[in-house]
Amino acid sequence: MKKLLLLAVLVISVLSCTQKEPQYVLTGNLDGLTDGGKVYLKKRKAGEYVTVDSAIASNGSFMMVGAVEFPEMYYLFVDGKRGAGRLFIENSEIEITGSADTLYKIEVAGCAIQDEYKAFNDGMSHFNDEFRANYKQRNEAKQAGDTEKQAMLEAQSDSIYDSYIAYQLDFVKNNPSSFISPTVLRGAAYGLSGEELGEYVNSFDESLSGLDDVKSLKERVEVLKKVAIGQPAPDFTQNDPDGNPVKLSSKFGNYLLVDFWAAWCGPCRAENPNVVKAYQKYHNKGFDVFGVSLDRDKDKWLEAIKKDNLTWTQVSDLQYWQNAAAKLYGVNSIPGNFLLDKDGIIIATNVRGGDLQQKLAELLD
């Protein structure tokens, strides 16, 4: 009887070993880690980093053990160090090497999905080289006062960017079952309409449906459909600099540019003179601007309004990228804008520079 009981225990023990649940074992060896310092594994959700695992560093090393349902993108942070390392986590033995001072350069081994992602990024490296060379040449042309060459190089930069986005979208289209495709699409989706984005999302294999990136992309499709050209502009209310609530619809009656910007946004500040020019030229003909700031520092917001001579209505909830109006309109890059007709119907999006002047000329001249 005792032998039978012992055999039963041994069988249960063996079965428990062979039926072990899938897990990841993440080990890291990073130069510059402080003994006793914390290393965090985080995931990005709703625009914020959420900690999913952590470890205490010892002798430059750390280890985390856990499990993931799907291979997804995670971020590695180290206490007291700037930046983060990006890596895919799957249930495997994953090794990280590098320096805590340059987390964006970490090397990752033991994760097949990460290997696929690295190969994809390696295929895009020539775009970065082209961007850097173009930027250098534009600066040289600017310093030399060669406006003609500047214009030519800016057009070239736009062409490089278009090719860069096309490369990513082609990958997504040709790899509908790849676990990295939703992450790639998320990075390339800024200029896509709700209908266009929906086509890519709907092409994903069913095996990807549980991924957080897929879920958030589906949510974005629905948001973008509500702010597409021809749709009524969603109404909202935010406070002006004096703390008075202002409703967007209270400004209907003129052609209205809903302008998303921020004091800290360099491209926004560069675009502001063009918006000022358009306002001064067409305001008396029936054009108005409704500025929505993604600032969080009220003093800097007010300083920028004054410095850039933004004399139209300005509102903000001072919630940075969590600005409620920006989320309502699916704004995830600035400057961004929506041009409304007199009834509050969206008739154009992201019209900037000469395009804004041309559109207003068509409408009001």
Image (cartoon, grey):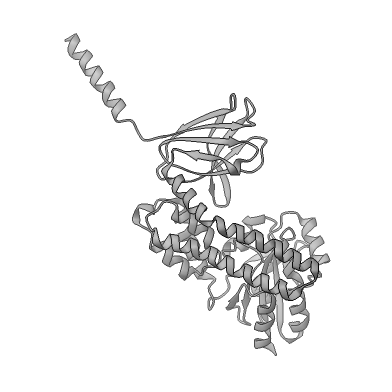
The image quadrant of residue 125 is bottom right
Nearest the camera: 310 or 84? Answer: 84
Position of 308 relative to 217 (above/below): below
Q: Could you tell me which quadrant the N terminus lies in?
A: top left
Please state, as top left, top right, bottom left or bottom right, where the C terminus lies in the image: bottom right
Furthest toward the top, the residue is 2
Residue 34: image location, x then y, percent = 64, 28
Res. 111 visible in picture: yes
Residue 314, quarter of picture: bottom right
Q: Position of residue 24 (x, y in %)?
A: 43, 35
Q: Does residue 315 appear in this view?
A: no
What residue appears at the point 70 percent right and 56 percent down from the top-left corner? 318
Residue at horizontal 58 percent and vertical 65 percent from the top = 161
Residue 358 placement (x, y as % from top left) = 67, 83
Above or below, 265 relative to 24: below
Q: Image point 35% across, 57% down: which residue?
A: 205
Horizontal relation, residue 9 to residue 313: left or right: left
Towards the viewer: 323 or 32: 32
Foreground residue among 343 and 207: 207
Report the side of 282 relative to 157 (left or right). Answer: right
Q: How many marks?
A: 0
Q: Which residue occupies 58% across, 66% down? A: 160
x and y, in percent, of residue 207 in the image: 35, 52
- Position of residue 158 in the picture relative to residue 189 (left or right): right
